[in-house]
Image (tube, rainbow, N blue to C red):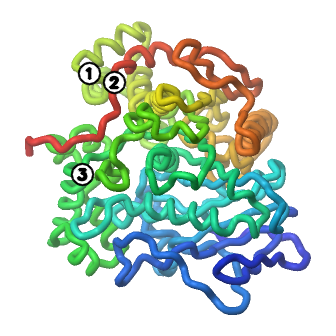
Amino acid sequence: MTTAVPETTGPPPEVRIASGVLRGSTQEGVAVFRGIPFAEPPVGGLRFAAPRPAGRWEGVREAVAYGPPPPQAAAFGMDALSRGTGTDWLTVNVWSPEPRTGAGLPVLVWLHGGAYIVGTAAQPEYDGARLAREGGLVVVTFNYRLGIEGFAQIEGAPANRGLLDQIAALEWVRDNVRAFGGDPDRVTVFGQSAGAGSIAALLTVPRAAGLFRRAVAQSVPGTFFSPELAADVTAACAAELGLRPTAADLATVAPDRLSAAGDAVGAKAAAFAGRWGSIAHRPILFSPVVDGDVLSATPWQALAGGAGRDVDLVVGHTRDEQRLFDVVDGTLGQVTPEQAATALERFAPGPDGARRYRDAFPAAGPGELYELVNSDRLFRMPSLHLATAQTAGGGRAHLYELTWAAPAMGGAFGACHGLDVPLVFGNLGSGLATMMIGDGGGARPAAEEVSASLRAAWAAFAAHGDPGWPAYDAEQRLTRLFDTRPVTTAYPEEASRLVWQDHVFAALPLHGAP
């Protein structure tokens, strides 16, 4: 991923943290420090271990380039990014408009998405300069282990290593963010997709308590695995290499080969449908594991019991989550009645879920039904249920939906999964934004309006806990709709809500049939 970032001339900023002195750079009036290790490289004797804090250094450490990405799956060609780039995967990056101790700025810490198998903080859409400068915030991004390295259930290794990496990064923020002008008592985590799923988990993890005061979860996925299911997926990946699913065996395999084994299993996951259920039909091989140690319950169950009541939450989704995947895989406008029927049978909740969808949306054709059930199952209903669980447990939640449609390709993307990311960061001319919004022209002013609204809401929430609309409750269900003119209204996806209202997002089990 690119490390070349436009810099502004002037003396480079320096800060002293617990590990030593850092020299960064200046970007658009913001001090930037990249590639700071928060943990030792998880290789050699630390392979598949819990993260160990990074050591000290002597002299001044240059912090001007992102650290290498962790091993990646092959999706979107991401595997090429981590080949031969080094093993110092666990690094943080900091943007600050006022890098001095005592500035007391609110802090936003980003957890990137990528289905728990791809992603790196170096992606251009995650550049924090604009968000930090215009929001008066310290913005932090970081890498964490993915795929088999981070989330496989491996005999002889702690579960949820990716989550443990995230906790270690947040501990680093607690211990060091003052040096960058941040207030460790005003830390807000925000993340999208797998990053939002991670945040949902961290809300309930005892060892993460006190590390953040507020949370923003954008498009929460509903997949959390039982240990048995996670172990069976790991065994299939190990079998690709003729190995046992143990830390001792898997540690003998280079990380890129291990990622490739996961890709190979994903490519034939449908053959495991009898054992793995829905995750085999749309391969999702890695997710947080309800292991009884790091996670004792799913986020929905734990929050409803009050586990996160001390953390204020903003949670929501985009209107057309599934549309991104329909465009990418070529199914947009091509869904047959048979494909829609299969999706409804596989993914709608309960034994009569397919019928309930058809009754709830009587005018919907195959494409709309296919999109609705996938959007609801993957992100919309898990996000809604997270708000419901948080309020049921005595906490405070604010619900939102992004309804502004991306203009590229004649509007084909709609308000799709991932559109919120460049809008929240304000990076409208690179990365995902180029694909969804376009290079400029008539679409840019509208995109800027929506982006400004989202950034202002997230910054206000980080600063004082009020994003600008009332808290969610189970009666009124007030929801902020982000468009060129934001409005607050009753939750707009009422028909889907009723279909899913009795569904429980439980840990996904291992089924008995081969």
Which residue bears the numbered disc 1? Answer: 350
Quarter that holds the N terminus: bottom right
Q: Which amino acid does the dot numbered 2 rest on?
A: His
Residue at the image point whose x is 29% and y is 40% from the top: 507
Marks 3 and 2, the one that precedes in the sequence: 3
In the figure, 431 relative to 438: above or below? below
Where residue 250 sits, quadrant-wise, is bottom left
Name which of mark 1 and mark 2 comes first in the sequence.
1
Disc 1 secondary structure class = loop
Label 2's element?
loop
Query: In front: mark 1 or mark 2?
Result: 2
Seen as rendered, the residue at the extreme bottom is 58
Contact (Cβ within 8 Å) of mark 1 with mark 2: yes
For mark 2, what is the residue? 503
Where 313 sits versus 289, above or below?
above
Q: Earlier in the sequence, mark 3 or mark 1?
A: 3
Whole-angstrom CA distance, mark 1 to mark 2, is 8 Å
Image location of residue 209, percent across then percent down: 52, 52
**Residue with the mark numbered 3:** 227
